[in-house]
Every structure is written in C-alpha cells, then in structure tokens.
Amino acid sequence: MIEVTGLTKRYGRTTVVNNLTFTVRRGEIIGFLGPNGAGKSTTMNMLTGYTAPTVGTVRINGYNLLDAPEKAKTAIGYLPEIPPLYMDMTVDEYLKFVFGLKNCKFPRKEHLDEVCEVVRITHVRHRMIRNLSKGYRQRVGLAQALINDPQILILDEPTVGLDPKEIVEIRNLVRTLGQTRTVILSSHVLSEIQAICERVIIINEGNLVADALTEDLARSAAANSRYIVRIAAPEDQVVPVLSAIPGMLKVEIQGVMEPGTVDVLVEAEKDVDIRRALFETCAKRGWYILVITPVGVSLEDIFLQLVDQTSSKKDDSPLTLDGASESPAGETEKDETEEEDEGE
Ligand code: ADP
C-alpha cells in the first residue's frame, strides 16, 4: 500500500533522511520512532507529498507520489506536527473549508457529522478553534485528516504537548481509527509506540536502524539475562557474594518486600544463564531463594542501544523518552540559509 524506496532528503550538504526503504501493508499500525531531529517529520512530509525527496520514490497504492500526486494523495489523511488550523474559524467553518479543499464528493453534512462523531467533537462544532483546549484542537486536526475517508492516516507526534488525560484519549482514538485504516504514527515516546503499534521503524540521524514487530524487538533483546531475586539472606552480604559469580554484570538491592528477605536485581552477561550458579552460591551459604522473576529488557533499552550504536556523535544531549520535556532540538538547529519551503 505504501512503498518507500531509497528515500533521501538533503538540505544543502546535510543529509537529513538517508536512503530509507520500507513497505507498509494495508491495515498495519506502524510506529515511526527516533530521537528529536532524527528525520521523522521530514520523512512524513515526503510520504504525504508536502516535501519532494532529493532522491527516491514513494508509491501509494501503486501511484508514484510525484507522477500522480492527486491519485496518491487522496488515499492519505495527514496530521502534521503542528495541525494546520485556522484559529479564527469555528470548528464547523474549518471542516467545511477542508471539505472543499479536498474536493470531497461525499454528501457534506452526513460526512462531516460522521467525522465529528468519530473524533467526538460534535459538541464543540460551533466554537472558535482558538478557544479550544490543546486536546480538542488535536481532535479537530484529526477530523481534518479524516475528511474524504482516507485509507491511510499519517500522524506526526499526535500527542505532543497534551496533558496525560488527553494523551490517553488521543491514543485510544488512534487505536480505534487503526482498526479500519493503515496508520503511520511518529513519536519519540517509546511507551506510546509500544501501546499502539504492532510494528516499529526506528530511524536515527536519517538512517533506518530497525524495522521489526514491536513484540519481536522487545523479545529479541530480552534474552532473560536479568532477574529480580528474593533471597532469605543478610542484606549486607548479598551484593559482594553474588557479584563474585562468574558472568555476573550487576547486583543491585531493590529493597525488603518480606521480612528476613531481600530483593535484588541481578544482571548477567548476554547469553549467560546465571540461575544455576545463583542457586549453588546461595545454597552453599544456606540462603533460600524464594522468588526468581525474569525482567525483560524494555523496548526503551533496545531503542537507546540502537541509537547509541548508530550515532556519529556519542556526546549528544540526552534523549527525551518520557514525553515530559519537549526540546525541539531539530527546529532550532535548522539552517536558515538552507531552508526550503516546498508547499503542495
Ligand atoms: P524529527 O521530526 O525526527 O525531530 P526533523 O525531520 O524535523 O526531525 O529534522 C531532521 C533534521 O533535518 C534536523 O536536524 C533538522 O534541523 C533538519 N531540517 C529539517 N527541516 C529542514 C529545513 N527545511 N532546512 C534545513 N534543515 C532542516
């Protein structure tokens, strides 16, 4: 349904998206993940025809976006990072305006009623967009993307700047929309991708560094080398004794959950099954192991690992992973002299 081949974007001498190739099938919900400045927005702008690639092609339902832009674009609803809203219009005026822009052939009243119902903005249709909360503006942004009933939805960081309740609502909405459509959703927030997307494409510095099912990615790196162990043992001896086991990387006290015991996080070298040695060591000292719980490596760990392995600058500022602080590093870095403004 979407075929991306060798997609590359250069601004002057800087390559911001480098030779991306991937395919998105009908009905998939794909997470497009990467740290700020990785090239997510630039890629989305190319997928939607807002920006022309320097090299490479995008095909939507078989139509090349450059050769047959109208045919290709009718299949896409796009919610850019900054929704294209007119603050001085009411929601209703704005949606009618977009309906006209998209040259939509559905019966207007019924179609807009339906779209407003889906994103639950029916009760604010008469209100000025400027007076709406950020969450509602985002819903209006989604509504405009849904006009003309596109099969593909491309959503650029749809929950940025929303409060936690709004984030949950928008995520649920995206999930619902994904039941009947193909969705590509960009985010730098891992938990978001994990919660919504079945497949994840990770880019770093414009390069594709992973393309995998979300659960496979999480499972592959898990390798069961980390455990929380509850041991009936003297707290002060646990760390030195367990740290001495060959293959042990880390032993960290987690706290006391049960009187007379201590919970420790142990981490072994990859592919070392530390459980037997752990048992023997404890048995020798008469320490009882009461619980062993494997702790999988989180998607976040894998993401950081991948980004770290593929970064040219190792001393980069920390990545924003929790969505709490938004540092639009990408925007401030933009080189004014190379600014290209390619509208539709
Ligand atoms: P992301 O969406 O992953 O945060 P972007 O696609 O916005 O990343 O940006 C990727 C890189 O491309 C950044 O370093 C940014 O500064 C640069 N960039 C984006 N747009 C332009 C432009 N119009 N001119 C020059 N550089 C740009």
Image (cartoon, grey):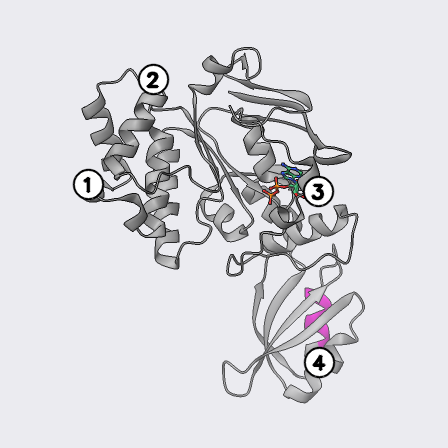
Q: Nearer the viewer, residue 287 or 245?
A: 245
**Tag shown at residue 205:** 3
Q: Is mark 2 within 8 Å of ligand 1?
A: no
Please state the extent of the stretch shown in magenta in the rendering: 275-281
Q: At which x and y percent is residue 71?
A: 46, 13
Q: Which residue is mark 2?
A: 103
Q: Which residue is mark 1?
A: 126
Task: Check residue 239 in the rendering and tell me which mark sits there, or answer none.
Answer: 4
Query: 326 and 84: which one is in front?
Result: 84
Q: Is residue 125 left or right of residue 57?
A: left
Label 3 sits on a secondary structure element that is: loop
Give the foreground label among 3 and 2.
2
Label 2, label 4: how many angstroms apart (C-alpha)?
Answer: 69 Å
| Separation (CA) of disc 3 from disc 1 | 43 Å
Identified by mark 3, the residue type is Glu
Residue 112: x and y in percent read 24, 29
Residue drawn at 63 percent across, 32 percent down: 340
What is the crowding at mark 3: few (fewer than 14 residues within 10 Å), some, or many (at least 20)? many
